[in-house]
Image (tube, grey):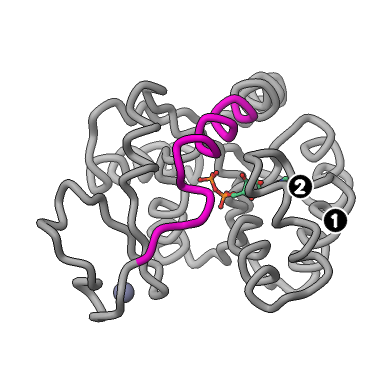
């Protein structure tokens, strides 16, 4: 099963992708994670990507499609794409080198997103938290490492990311709907466990 995971910044794509990967034995491929690894490693791709990411814009399609193509070559079995495609061009390119079974769309009320992302704290182990539930703690509950905030999780960049999502990425819902591949989970005010339950119910329908 090859899945595209769609959702606004802060919708919880990373959290759900980690759970889906585990339950359905899929490889989790996140373009955001790959860009951040490149930035950390000081690569050419990282240098290019950083200016776009800091501005809340999309990294150019050429490099983005290349890194996805490359990682799919190294992948055996099913996968879940998290953060790709992010515009119509990328979606059309993807169809040239991959066989996507379905697009899982996490639908979240936009009013919640700004606070959710700006209050987000991350751990290198992949866990993420919201300041409102940390009671001042600044280390990870799971592994004890110090929490940090992503460089692009500041109000100005987040607003730009949300606009980029609305203008360029949200139209992909129609693209996958027309292809008969769209599954939408309405996240409303559900917590991550409840969202995952709905996700599994949707994926169960597909697996039959
Ligand atoms: P979020 O969904 O919370 O915004 P991501 O980690 O998926 O976070 O992406 C972070 C940033 O990486 C994006 O704002 C964008 O600049 C860049 N990026 C990630 N995926 C893509 C993509 N498919 N195309 C272009 N840029 C991307
Ligand atoms: Zn941790």
Query: Does the closest atom of ligand 1 sit within 8 Å of the Cβ of label 2?
Result: yes
Location of residue 29 with respect to 153 vertically, above or below:
below
Quadrant containing the N terminus is: bottom right
Q: Residues within 10 Å of mark 1 (few under 14, many from 20)?
A: few
Secondary structure at badge 1 equals helix
Ligand 2 lies in quarter: bottom left
**Region of the chain picked out in magenta, as a range:** 148-165
Location of residue 208 with respect to 129 vertically, above or below:
above
Is label 1 in contact with label 2 (beta carbons under 8 Å)?
yes
User: What residue is shown at x 59% (from left), y 31% (from top)?
Assistant: 160
Q: Residues within 10 Å of mark 2 (few under 14, many from 20)?
A: many
User: What residue is shown at x 86% (from left), y 42% (from top)?
Assistant: 93
123 relative position to 84: left or right: left
Location of residue 192 with respect to 134 vertically, above or below:
above
Which numbered dot is residue 63? 1
Q: Nearer the viewer, residue 3 or 168?
A: 168
Residue 143 picture location, percent across and down = 26, 80
Q: Nearer the viewer, residue 28 or 123?
A: 123
Distance of mark 1 from mark 2, alpha carbons? 8 Å
Secondary structure at badge 2 equals loop
Tell me which secondary structure the magenta stretch mostly adopts.
helix
Q: Nearer the viewer, residue 195 or 143?
A: 143
Q: Which residue is mark 2?
A: 59
């Amino acid at each position: 099963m090859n899945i595209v995971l769609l959702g606004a910044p802060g919708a919880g794509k990373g959290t759900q992708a980690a759970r889906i990967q585990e339950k359905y034995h899929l490889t989790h491929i996140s373009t955001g994670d790959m860009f951040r690894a490149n930035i950390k490693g000081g690569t050419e791709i990282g240098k290019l990507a950083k200016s776009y990411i800091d501005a809340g814009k999309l990294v150019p399609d050429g490099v983005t499609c290349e890194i996805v193509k490359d990682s799919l070559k190294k992948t055996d079995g099913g996968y879940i794409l998290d953060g790709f495609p992010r515009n119509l061009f990328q979606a059309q390119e993807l169809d040239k080198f991959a066989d996507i079974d379905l697009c899982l769309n996490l639908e979240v009320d936009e009013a919640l997103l700004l606070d959710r992302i700006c209050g987000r704290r991350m751990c290198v182990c992949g866990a993420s938290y919201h300041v409102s539930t940390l009671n001042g703690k600044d280390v990870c509950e799971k592994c004890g490492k110090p929490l940090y905030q992503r460089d692009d999780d500041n109000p100005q960049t987040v607003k730009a990311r949300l606009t980029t999502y609305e203008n360029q990425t949200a139209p992909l819902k129609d693209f996958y709907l027309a292809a008969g591949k769209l599954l939408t989970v309405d996240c409303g005010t559900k917590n991550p466990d409840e969202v995952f339950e709905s996700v599994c119910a949707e994926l169960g329908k597909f697996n039959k």
